[in-house]
Amino acid sequence: MTTTTSLPKVRSTALWRGIAGVVGLALILEFASRSGIVNPAFLPPFSAVLTKAVLLWGDPVFREDVLATLLSYVYGMLIAIVVAVPLGIFLGLFRPAYRASRAVVELVRPIPPVALVPLVLLLLGAGLEMKLVIVVFAAVWPIMFNTLYGVHDVDPYTKEMARSFGVTRLGVVRRIVLPAAAPFIMTGIRIASSITLIVVVTVELIAGGSQGIGSFISRERAYGDAESYLAVLAATVTAGLLGLVINLVIGWVERRFFGWDSTTRGGI
């Protein structure tokens, strides 16, 4: 069993192992390209891709594309949280409502978000609203179900004791249910966060639009030359780095505010 005092050491070790893994992969890709094992036209040296990714930040158009993707991500996550958390609490507290809606939820939930692109594109066009609808659809489910599981995990005797001391139903939700379910909700947000960024870039890539990392990749891919291909790979690396930074930030928030809960102690 890992003690509290050894947790920082465990996280530090995991972090350095992660860094070592990334550096090792970069060296392998660099060697494979420069040695001719893989055609450099198909897989340019990793150093060239990384250099291009840095140089892209000097392009104001690319910075606007990154900002557009981040705004779509942030707006979509905020809307999904506002929708999913109250819905998860409601369904978790009222079993009849959950049973009545379960068939509909299980019917709609497996639909891939990207499959909605043609329909939403037809209704709303290739704008921010279209991306937000699909992003919210993708992000709602992990947040809602983790909230639901968190509410179900609350000790029923604790709620009954609070009611016996005259705490109102709303007070029980605010003072007992929400704090107890908060780590589950945060885990749902972290899971949804990774899904959301992938969906945003994918929708931009498929549906086009004027701005976004996916739109940038789509525009560069249309040129078909080696420099544009390098820019596509650099933009892809940038999207991956954004996802890594977002995940690290959310992981830090989990440990900072919910470190007392055992479900949040294993991340780096």
Image (tube, helix red, strand yellow):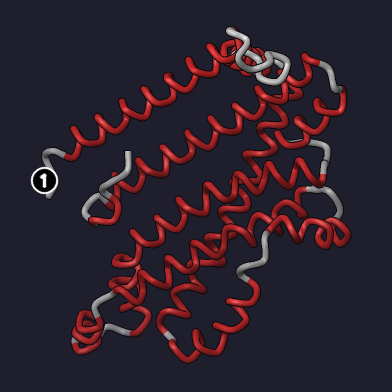
**Residue at 76% over, 48% down:** 128
**Quadrant of the rendering where the C terminus is positioned:** top left
Q: From this view, report whether residue 48 is shown above or below residue 93.
A: above
Disc 1 residue type? Thr
Left or right: 90 with respect to 262?
A: right
Left or right: 108 with respect to 222?
A: left
Single out the residue that lies furthest toward the top.
35
| Pointer 1 local density, CA inside 10 Å: few below 14, some 14–19, many at least 20 | few
Q: From this view, report whether residue 140 is shown above or below residue 36.
A: below
**Residue at 47% over, 80% down:** 91
Provide residue 32's location: percent of width, then percent of height.
56, 15
Left or right: 240 with respect to 230?
A: left
Q: Quadrant of residue 35?
A: top right
Q: From this view, report whether residue 42 is shown above or below residue 217.
A: above
Provide residue 65's location: percent of width, then percent of height.
72, 31
Disc 1 is placed on an element classified as: loop
Q: Quadrant of residue 252?
A: top left
Provide residue 214's location: percent of width, then percent of height.
73, 37
**Residue at 78% over, 15% down:** 226
For label 1, the residue is: 3
Q: From this view, report whether residue 75 is shown above or below residue 158.
A: above
**Residue at 40% over, 56% down:** 186
Provide residue 213's location: percent of width, then percent of height.
70, 33
Give the number of marks: 1
Q: Quadrant of residue 115?
A: bottom right
